[in-house]
Amino acid sequence: MSRPRLVSLSSRLVPGLLAIALFGVFAAVVVGTDFAGYVGFPDELSVTAEIGYALFDFTELQETNTESFLVSFLLIAVVLDAALDASLVLATREGPDESVRPSAFDGPSTRSTDDTEANGTAATDGGAVDGATKIDGEPASEAETASPTAGDATTDGGDGA
Amino acid sequence: MMETAAFALFAAVTLTSAAGVVLFRDPWHSALMLGVSLLSVAVHYVMLTAEFLAVIQVLVYVGGVLVLISFAVMLTQAGETPPETATGDGEVTGR
Amino acid sequence: MMAIEGYVLLSAGLFCIGLFGILTRRNALMFLMAVELMVNAAVINLVAFALYHGTLTGQVFGLFVLGLAAAEVAIGLGIILVLYRNFGTIDVSVPTTMRW
């Protein structure tokens, strides 16, 4: 039923060929480079323990000359916290009096109709569960217009009203 | 010799599934191929004596990133037309 | 021990496949997955040269890159969901509001 289809690349083939040409350059450089001087790890080295020592600056316990990474470790922790907060900020829907819709959808055709027709339902329903109603397959109650883009714009328009 | 054969096998798996990621039209198929590609990259880590990194790769990527991506696929492809009824190159709808 | 050239070539191939995906697709989700492929190519290089030089700095860096990639995916998915909520599509050529 859903056999995988390949995307058609006829219109955007030139930048793709650029990427393949870049691989050609890479391959030429790699083949032309002499990779002698291989060192490798000693046989009975515990790699995981060494990584732990490097992460917590236990330099006297290390058997290889790995650098210490305590500051980077803490910085990565801060960055991950910031990413968590940022994704929450992005996912949180703004209040009913603050439209997140860009002005590109502020056309007079969608704007003037939804304020009069779909005001009450959009304020309650169009807010938090906009994606959920799309998942369930039941159309949003205020989306009278045919195209999905216009329906979405109508939903957000009632939200901002 | 055995190691070279294993490397060739898993390099073929990695590159083929990565090509599948960028060539499949349906993003859900692309996400599945991304899972195959990430798992075979984890096998490469094991062959490079980075077992801890391989475990973290499976945990973080396949267990976290891939689940997030599949959630995004399910959330954003809900109203799209199925791929067998899509006409043209399908790029207009963002596929 | 496999020769290091194989891993560097594999990494270059993976990176170029990711770049191919970014240059040819317009779906924002495909952008995210292609960036994941490119990050993995970079980490393969780091791990291969860590073994090559006999030091673990490359592996620790690979660990950090994995964490950063997870953070990047979290923010990227938030951006994609906001994009879908505001524009009704995740085609990256549709949002032209901030384009000069």
Image (cartoon, coloured by chain):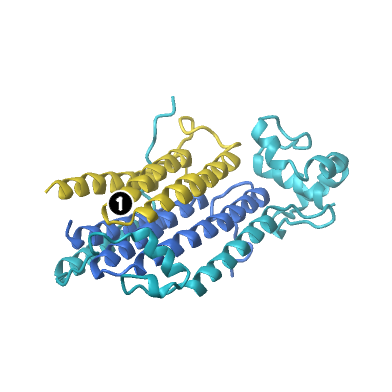
Chain colours: A cyan, B yellow, C blue
Relative to C72, is A10 above or below? above
Q: Residue furthest top?
A: A1
Give the residue type that dot 1 points to.
Val
**Relative to A160, is C15 on the left or the right?**
left
Between A57 and A4, which is closer to the camera in this rendering?
Answer: A57
Give residue B92's position: percent from left, percent from top: 51, 46
Between A106 and A63, which is closer to the camera in this rendering?
Answer: A63
Residue at the spot 84% in from the left edge and 45% down from the top edge: A123
Give residue B78's position: percent from left, percent from top: 59, 36
Residue at the spot 57% in from the left edge and 52% down from the top edge: C77
**Relative to A130, is A96 on the left or the right?**
right
Q: Is residue A42 visible?
A: yes
Using the rendered view, name the quadrant where residue A122 is placed. Answer: top right
Residue that numbered label 1 is attached to? B46
Using the rendered view, name the quadrant where residue C3 is placed. Answer: bottom left
Give residue A101's position: percent from left, percent from top: 72, 55
